[in-house]
Amino acid sequence: MKKNKLKLLMSLLVLSVMLFYSCEEDDLATISLNEIVLSESALQLSIDEVKPIIVTPSPNATTEKVTWSSSNEQVAVIQFNENGLVAGVKGISLGEAILTAQNANGNITNTVTINVIIKIESIALEEIVSADPSQTSYNVVFFPENATIKTVTWSSSDPSVISVDENGVVAAVSPGVAVITATTDQGQKTAVVQLAASGDPAILGLQYCSISGTGGYNADTIDTTGAEGDISYTGSQPANNYELVSETLIVATESQFSISLTQSNNWSKSKIWIDWNGDKDFEDTGELVAEFGLDAQLNDGPFSANISVPVDAVIGSSRMRVQILDAWTDYGLCGDVANQTTKDFNVEILGVSYCSISGTGGYNADTVTTTEADNNLNYSGSQPNGNYEFFTEQTLGVTTGSSFTLELTQSNNWSKSKVWIDWNGDGDFEDTGELVIEFGLDAQLNDGPFSQSITVPNDAVAGSTRMRIQTLDAWVDHGLCGDIANQTTKDFKLSVF
């Protein structure tokens, strides 16, 4: 049955090509005695793929016919019309076969090399992050994974901005934007990535412009309340009137928080920007979030304002810029700007808001460490104020379907500990499977240390989420929101890949 279907398929192909060339039927009935000219010299076929081969007519032709043969019919078979001028070849299995066309005497021949392969359907680029900010590189992911020919050619739309070598290593050359393209040698499938370079010397990606200043201006204190992770800053005037503060403000889209500020003198005014869309500037509508004090007058302070996080704020890392400047001058955001001091803070924008929690009593997770994760935690800390802490200096990174081990020590043995992970990223820990560990038993002493393996669900939502660890009295039950007695809660950043 399969053989009959094969013959039918190839016969139809040959017939269709014959009809296409029917307007030259008289010419196609003869071929040159001097040579056999073929439309193809080599073909790559998939299994079951069929392609035509045409013998080109030439002047002074004879009525001599062409016959065809395959060196390996287990790899490729060929059928042809009565005079052999139109043929169809079909891939049968992986490998190579040589098709031979010859005249009746066998003294004039030509060949077509057939390679039956698994063809590339598409490709994607997978970045390999480099410690060098001016470089990165990409692996090519082939679909299907077992494609036969896995070679690509790399190119840049503007090598004077961003270059790429034959191994997919990308380097920033000068500020600007360029498109990097990988093109498969088989099938000409492409994958592209648009990259930006900035700075001098250039690095990959956009970066915030540098700024410096002059004069005796300073934000002595900057505090927030109501954010997912608040800042509480106190500092003197920095060298060159600029400082990138190590504290990180963490906010969620569609939420609101308060910020308060004190100035070092009353002839100043203050402005605060947040780069909501993460494009490495503060120039977009709505990014000037607070102005403290009026122009051309004394402004005593302290100052405070409520700030709303836009619903369309881009999730990820960003920055807040706070500038204290002379009330009789205007601001500047880049370069050497007189009569001002600028302080930048890192901002982490989350897609969801987690409920606040506080507690009482002497309970604490002294250490929390992980192993076998993509990016591990190594935390140690004392009992925090209000019995709650959001630890943001490290991020636990995991891959769906993988496993990692979490180890924990408690500050005392009358405690037990519970661990939740918000696998679906919906801003709570209430879903099935999100209580991942219980260390210790109820109503008894639990010495520890504790250790357990955690498997990341295959359907865990990729992106940023949170792990919550609560250490509480072994004789009471937990609570995840509000003021909960006899417990301390610590949250950790988690990225799912």
Image: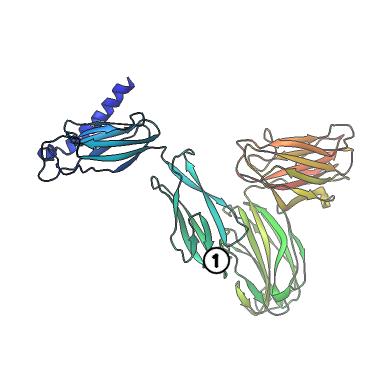
Residue 436 falls left or right of residue 126: right
Residue behind mark 1:
198
Residue furthest toward the top? 1
Q: Position of residue 362 (x, y in %)?
A: 88, 45
Q: Position of residue 324 (x, y in %)?
A: 69, 73
Q: Nearer the viewer, residue 16 or 64?
A: 64
Colour setting: rainbow
Q: Quadrant of residue 363?
A: top right
Q: Position of residue 273 (x, y in %)?
A: 63, 65
Q: Is there any visible trace of residue 330 in the rendered image?
A: no
Q: Quadrant of residue 45?
A: top left
x 49%, y 59%: residue = 164
Q: Is there any visible trace of residue 112 in the rendered image?
A: yes
- Check the image and report above or below for 194 versus 89: below
Residue type at tag 1: Ser
Q: Position of residue 254 (x, y in %)?
A: 62, 51
Residue 401 falls left or right of residue 15: right
Q: Nearer the viewer, residue 16 or 222?
A: 16
x 60%, y 52%: residue = 315
